[in-house]
Amino acid sequence: MAMAEISRRRFVEALGAAGAVSAFALTGCGSQRASEGGSAAAGGTADTITFAQGADPRGLDPAYVDDGESAKIMCNIYDTLLRYDTETCDIVPGLSDLPEISDDGLTYTFKLHEGVKFHDGTDCNADAVKQNIDRQLEPNRTEDMPYASFVYGSEDTNSGVESVEAPDDTTVVITLRAASTPFIKNMAMALAAPVVAPSAYADGANSNEKPIGSGPYKFVSWSKGENVVLEANEDYWDEEHKPQTKNVIFRFIAENSSRVTALNNGEVDIIDGIDASVVPTITDAGNELFDEDGMNINYMAFRNDEGQFTDVAARKAFCQAVNVGEMVKSLYGDYATPANSVMPIWMAPYDEDIVQTAYDPDAAKAAFADLGITSCTMLTYTNPRPYNSIGGQPLAEAIQGYLADAGVDMEIVSYDWTTYQTKVETDKFDVCLYGWTGDNGDPDNFMNLLADTNVSMNVGRYNNDEYKALIAEGLATEEGEDRDAIYKQCEQMVADEMPWMLISHSKNLAGYSPKVQGFFYHPTGVVHLEGVTKTA
């Protein structure tokens, strides 16, 4: 990426303060958007938009899932206290106005809009917000709430939410254990933060399969392996974001080529999870390509707590064996860039001077021989991911080839994405492929992964007290050069310790029919469809 582009795309503080209100906000990536279709009705407007993605959601309650397939659907069903602007990571009001924040940065007071209803007619009020957060705080949170500690913190780390109060129907007061710069951004995230109707999970109700929110679309049905059907919430409280299309269908089509065929045949209107090889097929058929730098990282995690690569010398040998730049160009073409940083290159505080382990096949082969490493096991997934459009199998096989040249036989064990997320927690392995799409545009959202105690976040089980101390310091430090310097130290530790082998940052790619107006693939990897229309 050209340096002028890097400069243009760096995140900046973009949200002002009014009166006692203070907040942090970031500009997101880019401004590409399908042409606005305000007068599309001249030829008639279709009543259904169909979006095809590569896999089923893991579930539809944001407290119990941690994947993009789930998030893309849920962000259309639920509201959050705050939201990101349509095309950026700027923080704007949601269910609440921007909060009042105490001088010590510990107390956030949110004023909710009056009269908001959940889809079942129950009140979306302060008590409902309190219940949603309380169920994800210790000691209430359960092990199957993967994002809870990430968003709301924990007692062990003396971070996050200490208490939530609802003094009246429209007031929520959240008190933190320690000041947290990214907390306000967390309140707009698509996972853990959305407000679910308490009736959806009370008395044994299955909120994961029968969600109830207050968002622009209502849940209708979920046919496993086929689709999720949503219908417009005609009584949606937010006039600015009222749904423009009556029905939204999320179809699940595992194969990239099959999704492309469905788009070109007019069976679906929008697809994601596409790779460079199918772009000409999409555009030659007269469809449009959404092409925007993503907020993501594609990486391979070493198992840091057991197996062949607990020692940094072994991890270094592995990294020396793989020509990452060559591999990324071969697999992704112009739609991904080799990663020199955990964070995307356009996102502050990226440090161009940090150097990852260089490709050195001779040194790798010698080191593996000295260490006595002749074999290892890799777990991978088969589905395309937002950070890896080709899916895990081709990437695993490319790495396998480099390892073979270095004298190491790497066994690949593959699973579909839903099964895979369980296997990386339960099965033994030496390395695994994984990735991350940023939730909120804050550097902590990337760097904190390696300090998290939740395996679904920190699949390599990296555990370094010095690193965790830096993360805690970064959380409490205000935006600016001092905070940037902390995360640069974190980046340098990753380069030195190599808990991950960094691979690439991918572009957000989506194909869509020229009949579609108003579509935008958000930097956080979700798709808000309430403003999307299609000419009939």
Image (cartoon, rainbow, N blue to C red):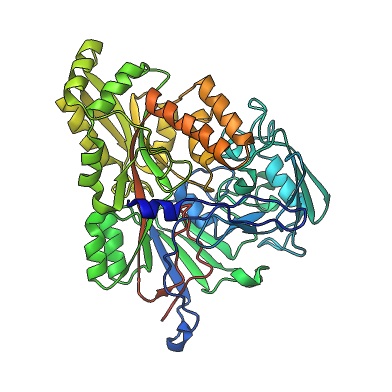
Can you name the residue that lies furthest to the right here? 167
Give the quarter of the image for residue 29: bottom left
**Position in image of residue 250 (x %, y %):** 44, 61
The quarter of the picture where residue 356 lies is top left
Extreme-bottom residue of the structure:
42
Residue 297, by quadrant, is top left
| Residue ID at (74%, 39%) | 106
Residue 498 visible somewhere in the drawing: no
Residue 231 % position (x, y): 55, 68
Viewer-proximal residue among 481 and 90 = 481
Which residue is at a point 22% across and 63% down the rendered structure image?
280
- How many circles with numbers are drawn on the protein? 0
* Residue 205 sits above or below residue 487 on the image: below
**Res 514 visible:** yes
User: Vertically, is 15 above or below 318?
Assistant: below
Front residue of this view, candidates 221 and 489: 489
Q: Quadrant of the C terminus?
A: bottom left
Using residue 431 as the reference point, say whether residue 38 is left or right of it: right
Looking at the image, which residue is at 65% across and 60% down?
214
Frontmost residue, 411 versus 200:
411
The x, y position of residue 395, in whole percent, is 26, 40
